[in-house]
Image (tube, rainbow, N blue to C red):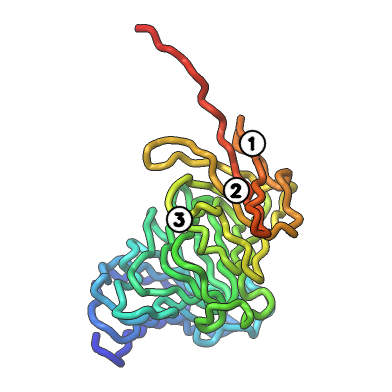
Amino acid sequence: MSDGSYLSIEMNSNRWLDLYSDVFGSGTMKIVCNASNAAHNKLFIGVHGDCSGFYGKTQIFNENSKTVLPLEENLNYFTVSVGRGESLGGAMTGFWYNGIEIRDYNRIVPLKSMALEAKNRGIFVNGTAYFVCSNDVELAIKNRITYNGAVKKTGVGTLALGGEEPLFYNGSATTSTVVAESNNLVIAEGALKVLSSAAFRGLKVTFGAGMKLALVSEGDATLGMDLTKDGSDLVITDSKLAVEVLPNAKGKYKMTAICTVPSTSTLTVDSFAAPTGGEIIAVNNGDGTITFKAVPPKAGFFINFR
């Protein structure tokens, strides 16, 4: 593909299409649901090719079905099954906040554990976008996300969120442009893993009933979820949010930050369910913020005689 060109994949009825082609060059790759509002179609497409040589934009949207019907389940939408992280595009020559644009209740379904981390390829969520991780699948999003709506995580697998501080609306770095309910991260099913603290700044994070937060004691997540920026919030549906501490790269379990919030927050250590045999502590950082941390159980001391 060349600059200014389009590859448009359009479907308008209940169909399934698998695309195994590799895509190279620039331009815009459009995956379009073109069904009528009355049809309530659920369309499926699989993208499996190696598109790491494609440095143009990727757009996933609905042509005719946006806000006409009030019930979400009545809307037409695409389910896009992704065979590899590179299937949605490779590195871009400069940062584009909308390198991948997902809107209109469309779904991204990774077929196996993978990472979205192509350099400079931002992800723009315009409206509501679903990331569906089933079974043991972990989707690691390390690209910078721009929120103008909601990211909703479903499926029993794990969404791992890392990368830089989010942007908002149409690429703004501040939450002053955020309208109500447009900075939402909703964990409706499964687990959320924190890969970087910065990825949560300015977000309203909501955990549904029975969900859990998975923590890794390494990398850029020293503050857990950084919820100190204006607009940030943590909403826990259960009486407590279950917390799991995962081993680091050396197989060690260490005390790990859950989240950092303003000292005026109503959260307490009782807002979190400690790992089995462990505990939750609160650390006053002396700068108007508090960091809640999960302390895993201590292994103890033993001698093995042989």
Mark 3 vs mark 2: which is more N-terminal?
A: 2
Extreme front residue here? 286
Q: Is residue 261 visible?
A: no
Q: Residue 210's x, y, as percent?
A: 65, 48
Looking at the picture, tell me which residue is in the foreground, 300 or 12. Answer: 300
Asked if the residues shown at circle 3 and circle 1 are in contact, with their CB atoms under 8 angstroms apart, the answer is: no
Q: CA distance from mark 3 to mark 2?
A: 20 Å
Q: Residue at x 36, y 85 (%)?
A: 8
Q: Quadrant of the N terminus?
A: bottom left
Foreground label between 3 and 2: 3
Looking at the picture, tell me which residue is in the foreground, 123 or 129. Answer: 123
- The residue that label 1 is drawn on is 279
Left or right: 305 as drawn, with respect to 131: left
Q: Residue 37's x, y, as percent?
A: 58, 83
Q: Which image quadrant for residue 87? A: bottom left
Mark 3 vs mark 1: which is more N-terminal?
A: 3
Q: Residues within 10 Å of mark 3 (few under 14, many from 20)?
A: some
Q: Residue 53's x, y, as percent?
A: 23, 74
- The kind of residue tagged 3 is Asp
- The residue that label 2 is drawn on is 212
Q: Residues within 10 Å of mark 1 (few under 14, many from 20)?
A: some
Left or right: 244 as drawn, with respect to 144: right
Mark 1 vs mark 2: which is more N-terminal?
A: 2
Above or below 191: residue 4: below
Looking at the picture, tell me which residue is in the foreground, 221 or 17. Answer: 221
Foreground label between 1 and 2: 1
Q: Residue at x 27, y 68 (%)?
A: 49
- The residue that label 3 is drawn on is 220
Q: CA distance from mark 3 to mark 1?
A: 22 Å
- The kind of residue tagged 2 is Lys
- The kind of residue tagged 1 is Glu
Q: Residue 221's x, y, as percent?
A: 49, 54
